[in-house]
Every structure is written in structure tokens, then in C-alpha cells.
Image (tube, rainbow, N blue to C red):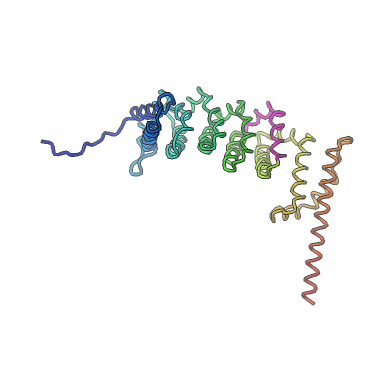
Amino acid sequence: MSFSFFKILRPKTPQEVAKSIKDSLMALDTKTVFEVKTLEKALEEVEKNFVTMRCMLSGDGESEPNMDQVSQLVEELCKEDVVALLIYKLPILGWEARKNLVYCWSILLRHKVDSKYCCVEYIEQHFELLDFLVVCYDNKEVALNCGIMLRECFKFPTLAKYILESPSFELFFKFVELPDFDVASDAFSTFKDLLTKHGKLVAEFLEAHYDEFFDLYDKLLTSSNYVTRRQSLKILSEFLLEAPNIHIMKHYIQEVRHLKVMMTLLRVFVANPNKPRDVKIILAKNQEKLLELLHNLSPAKGDLMFQDSHLLALALFQAQKMSNLRRKRSSSSRKSRLSS
């Protein structure tokens, strides 16, 4: 007679884990889910399977992951097209399931099987998955999850190159100005990675699409949103000063249209009556050099817009200089009265 009251559960194999994930994700299909309770049960099953996947990929906290099993799981997820399901079903997953998926995503991408990045190669054969992740920035519920997944993808040159050359790239110029601050900030982080992670790749892209790119980028630099202007200027300075982009930078600074944009930005900083202390200090320290630079600029004849911006920037700096002088004199006068 057996005195075992409890059945010891056998751990699932990588193939069984992959099949369970696929079946539970397929069960979320709107054609088969016709009742709320059925959907809730299907989502719970997905969440449970994602926890199993996470444990197999990263260990359970007590033991390290079995790398042979990890390799088998990665191969199976690609072979059974589960990678595509993970992305396409993301918008309808619950919060906990999305969190576990994002955690597993970087492991899946970075894991090599026989010196090959299986998941990266899978995405290279299904580039539309990247387009889908980019478009998901329009969905506030999953935007931040998709942003993290995209930034992991853009660590690989082939995936970054695809988005740079895809129509989806232009969507970033819209997403960085979305009204939701968290989503817009995350889109800026992804945009920055795309433009700074692979210098040579970006240099080739900018050389081929110079006018189209900077026409769009100038709109960010002249946006009515202060955060957009500040972030865009910061990213611009970073990728233009990258060694592979030096020839792009030289081209950029030779164009009057870009100088106009920079002068407008400078004018905004100087004219702001509520300048932060750090901005005041930088302007005060550099006011002589900036005034000398503005005096030496020669606006082209007939370019009335540039002439107006030049004169206004010059006048604002001179006014700022006079204000600083009056402030110093007033301070000195107070000190003199106190000492006497």
C-alpha cells in the first residue's frame, strides 16, 4: 500500500512551457473569447505560464537557471512562432503578465544558441513586429512596456537599422509630443537610443535622409513645449558630436536655417523672465562672448526674418547685461551703506 498522499509534480520541459504559453495566448483570440469570465480565466492562465517562463529563464531565486533548458525554450519559442504572439497579444495582457514579459524579453533577445541570437534572427525575419511595438506608443496602457522592449531591440544594429528606414520612424516625432508626460518622456528615451547607440549606422542614415530628417527635427526644436525643445536640443548635441557624424555636423552648421532655429532658442532663454538660477549663471558667465558673437554675425541682406531675430537677440543680451550691472551696483551700494 502506498502512503503517499501528495503527488509530486514533474517540472515542465521547455517544449511543454512553450506549448502552454502558445495555447494560452491563442485562447485570448477575440473569436474564441465570448464571455468575460472566459477571458479572465485565459488571462490568468497566461500570467501563470509567464511566471513559469520567467523561472526557467532566470532561476527561481534558490537555484540558477539550467542553460540547456533556456536554449531549448528560446529555440522552441521561435520555432512555434510564440515570439510573434508575445508581441501581438501584449495590448490585452494584464499588468502582471506585461511586467513578466518585459523582464523575460531582454533575456530572450540576448541569449545565444550555438553563437546565434535566435530571437533577434526571428525578428529579422518578421520586421513588422517592430512596427507594431512602435505603434503601441499610441496605447497609453502598454506604451511604457513597448518602450522598454524597443530599447532592448535597438541594442542590435539590424533591428535599429530597420526602424530608421521604416515609415514607423517618423511616428517618433509625434510620440515625443504626446500630452501624457510619462509616455512622451519614454518615447524620447527610445528616440535617443535609436539615434545614439550605433554611430556609423546613424551617420549613414542621416547622410541619405538629411533634408527629410532635419525638416522634422527643426519642428521639435521650435515646439511650443519647453520640455520638447530642451530634450531635442540635448539629443541633437549628443548625436551630432559623435565621431561618425562629424561631417553631418559640419553640414548642419553651414546652413542658415539651423542658425535661425538656434538663435530663436537662445532668444527664448534670454527673454524668459523666470529663468532658473542655473540658466542665469550660465548666461551671466558667457554674456561677453555671446554679445561679441552676435555683434560679429552678419545677417544676409534681404533676410528680414534673420535680421529681426539677430537684432532682438542682441537687444535682449544687452538688456540682460545692463540688468546685471544695475544689480551689481545696487548690491555694492547696500554693502557700502551697511559698512558706514
The residue positioned 80% from the left and 77% from the top of the image is 340
Compared across the picture, whether 233 is left or right of 130 comes to: right
Quadrant, the N terminus: top left
Q: Compared to 122, does 46 lie above or below?
A: below
Q: Is residue 39 left or right of residue 258?
A: left
The residue sitting at the bottom extreme is 340
Residue 84 lies in the magenta-colored region: no
Give the image location of residue 239, x and y in percent: 65, 37
Main SS, magenta region, reads: helix
User: Relative to the observer, which residue lies in front, 175 or 310?
Assistant: 175
Which quadrant would residue 244 be assigned to in this image? Answer: top right
Q: Position of residue 12 (x, y in %)?
A: 31, 32
- Mark yes or no: residue 59 visible: yes
> Magenta span has 215?
yes
153 lies left or right of 61: right
Q: Position of residue 25 (x, y in %)?
A: 41, 29
Image coordinates for residue 9, horizontal then vertical, percent: 25, 35
Magenta span of residues: 199-223
Q: Can residue 118 be seen in this snapshot? A: no
Q: Nearer the viewer, residue 157 or 327?
A: 327
- The image shows a total of numbered marks equal to 0
